[in-house]
Image: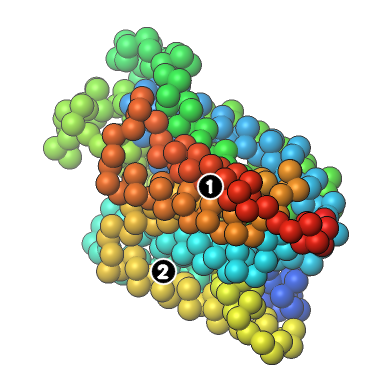
């Protein structure tokens, strides 16, 4: 890359660190560090939510879907809109109107309230593992993007740069730094795609006439997709909005219920149609470029043999001039960092509140908890860096952890919040059975009917387990009255 592009990129990185330094002086305790003093506004929260959810994976993944199937790939993020709006209507009122949750920091604290300490501890372990892994995978993704873009930059130095940046400003500033940097990062990403990526790539491939002449009609259709794929996306994505630790931190950070609901409606609209259509459109343009032979100079003349998710980065690398390349790389790094920092904060909150808090008998002072939180955040960041450095298959392994979290945690939470069922033993075993079943089916690659997602069977296993135990071993009457 040209030194102008490098200068732009370095200025962006220093700006992110500056936000962390600013909030290092502002944070006065754990209320500030983990939930932003519970006074955050709708737009900052909404942009932070969508930045965290879409992140680097969806940004690159949408390009891959556009490359493979065209505009129909945008339906993937329609499930994100459904999840966000369902959570706004159904979940947020239940959480914000319950006075018992007024001083909560994490999702597992809800499990402790409904099911007891043992279930809360298990939920904290599951969530901490999943989010530590996601932090690691985002660092690795950013490092691979950097090493592929900056000539002469090897993977390990790139990983250290990405990791140190994300960890340092998150450790210093806590959730406020994360939310405000997410806002900046999302604006950079949207502006980069809308004002640089789309117009430059559109004209580089020859405009609408060339696009129509190059691709078959199904690339421009919204019906180029089957019901199984839609169902699998829904099963994978919608439950995230009900059991994602990063989302509960933001629900608790909002100043009131109305602010939280507005933030979730904002996030849903940015997911679909805005980000969804921009992402798949850029992927579609990369397919046009590949078919036209624009990547032949790199030895990639066969569009059919090209990795779908390589198409968009290759197109940007090919057509963007000096200066604009630095801005676009900043945009994509924004997407990656906005997920990495949020996952790091989620894992830190789980360890400090749900693990150490549940096991420690003597309470610390407010200042002591804040310092412990910063050290734990640093430690998890270093661990995530280590995983990314030595385990190149960490993404696949941690996706299993995430599947374990989603299929294990959803059923007990829904049972407690919406049906008033608070059976601790049923919750504990439903979490283990549901999550384990999903992991086993995924790891062993067991063929499933109609190619349905393993998460569906994990959720069914969790539901059957919870209903069976709560029915066959009902709580004593006195226990039910106490729970009520």
- Whether residue 43 is situated above or below residue 127 in the rendered picture: above
Q: Residue at x 75, y 71 (%)?
A: 31
- Whether residue 218 is situated above or below residue 389 in the rendered picture: above
- Tell me if mark 1 has few (under 14), some (14-19) or many (20+) residues whose alpha carbon lies within 10 angstroms of its own: many
Residue 69 as seen in the image, left or right of residue 191: left
Q: Residue at x 76, y 37 (%)?
A: 89
Q: Quadrant of residue 71?
A: top left
Q: Quadrant of residue 449?
A: top left
Q: Position of residue 87 (x, y in %)?
A: 69, 41
Q: Position of residue 51 (x, y in %)?
A: 57, 48
Number of dots carrying numbers: 2
Query: Could you tell me if residue 335 is visible in this image?
Result: no
Residue pointed to by mark 1: 465
- Whether residue 170 is situated above or below residue 230 in the rendered picture: below
* Circle 2: element type: helix
Q: Quadrant of the N terminus?
A: bottom left
Of tags 2 and 1, which is closer to the observer?
A: 1
**337 or 49, nearer to the observer:** 49
Q: Residue at x 77, y 43 (%)?
A: 261
Instruction: Give me the disc on residue 315.
Output: none
Q: Quadrant of residue 214?
A: top left
Residue pointed to by mark 2: 384
- Tell me if mark 2 has few (under 14), some (14-19) or many (20+) residues whose alpha carbon lies within 10 angstroms of its own: many
State the separation of the CA atoms marked 2 and 1.
Answer: 33 Å
Q: Residue at x 30, y 49 (%)?
A: 443
Q: Position of residue 457 (x, y in %)?
A: 44, 38
């Amino acid at each position: 890359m040209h030194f102008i592009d490098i200068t732009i990129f370095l200025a962006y990185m220093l700006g992110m660190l500056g936000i962390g330094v600013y909030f290092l002086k502002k944070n006065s305790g754990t209320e500030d560090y983990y939930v932003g003093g519970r006074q955050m506004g709708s737009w900052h929260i909404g942009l932070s939510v969508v930045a965290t959810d879409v992140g680097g994976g969806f940004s690159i993944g949408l390009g891959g879907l556009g490359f493979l199937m065209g505009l129909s790939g945008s339906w993937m993020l329609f499930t994100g809109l459904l999840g966000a709006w369902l959570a706004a209507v159904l979940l947020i009122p239940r959480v914000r109107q319950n006075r018992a949750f007024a001083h909560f920091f994490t999702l597992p604290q809800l499990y402790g309230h409904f099911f007891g300490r043992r279930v809360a501890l298990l939920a904290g372990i599951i969530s901490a593992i999943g989010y530590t892994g996601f932090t690691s995978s985002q660092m690795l993704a950013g490092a691979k993007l950097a090493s592929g873009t900056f000539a002469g930059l090897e993977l390990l130095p790139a990983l250290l740069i990405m990791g140190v940046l994300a960890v340092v400003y998150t450790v210093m500033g806590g959730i406020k730094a994360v939310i405000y940097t997410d806002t900046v990062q999302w604006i950079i990403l949207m502006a980069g795609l809308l004002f640089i990526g789309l117009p430059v790539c559109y004209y580089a491939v020859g405009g609408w006439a060339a696009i129509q002449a190059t691709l078959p009609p199904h690339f421009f259709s919204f019906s180029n997709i089957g019901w199984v794929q839609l169902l699998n996306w829904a099963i994978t994505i919608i439950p995230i909005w009900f059991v994602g630790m990063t989302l509960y931190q933001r629900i608790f950070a909002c100043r009131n219920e109305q602010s939280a609901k507005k933030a979730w409606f904002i996030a849903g609209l940015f997911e679909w149609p805005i980000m969804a259509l921009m992402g798949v459109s850029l992927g579609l343009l990369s397919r046009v470029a590949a078919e036209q032979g624009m990547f032949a100079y790199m030895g990639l003349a066969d569009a059919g043999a090209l990795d779908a998710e390589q198409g968009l980065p290759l197109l940007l690398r090919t057509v963007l001039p000096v200066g604009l390349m630095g801005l676009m790389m900043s945009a994509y790094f924004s997407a990656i960092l906005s997920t990495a920092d949020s996952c790091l904060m989620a894992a830190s909150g789980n360890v400090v509140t749900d693990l150490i808090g549940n096991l420690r008998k003597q309470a610390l002072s407010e200042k002591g908890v804040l310092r412990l939180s910063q050290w734990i955040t640093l430690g998890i960041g270093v661990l995530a860096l280590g995983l990314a450095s030595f385990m190149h298959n960490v993404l696949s392994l941690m996706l299993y952890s995430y599947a374990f979290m989603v299929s294990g945690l959803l059923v007990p939470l829904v049972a407690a919040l919406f049906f008033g069922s608070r059976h601790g033993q049923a919750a504990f075993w439903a979490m283990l059975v549901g999550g384990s079943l999903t992991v086993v089916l995924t790891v062993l690659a067991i063929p499933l009917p109609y190619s349905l997602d393993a998460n569906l069977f994990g959720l069914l296993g969790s539901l059957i387990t919870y209903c069976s135990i709560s029915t066959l071993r009902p709580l004593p009457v006195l226990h039910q009255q106490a729970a009520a």
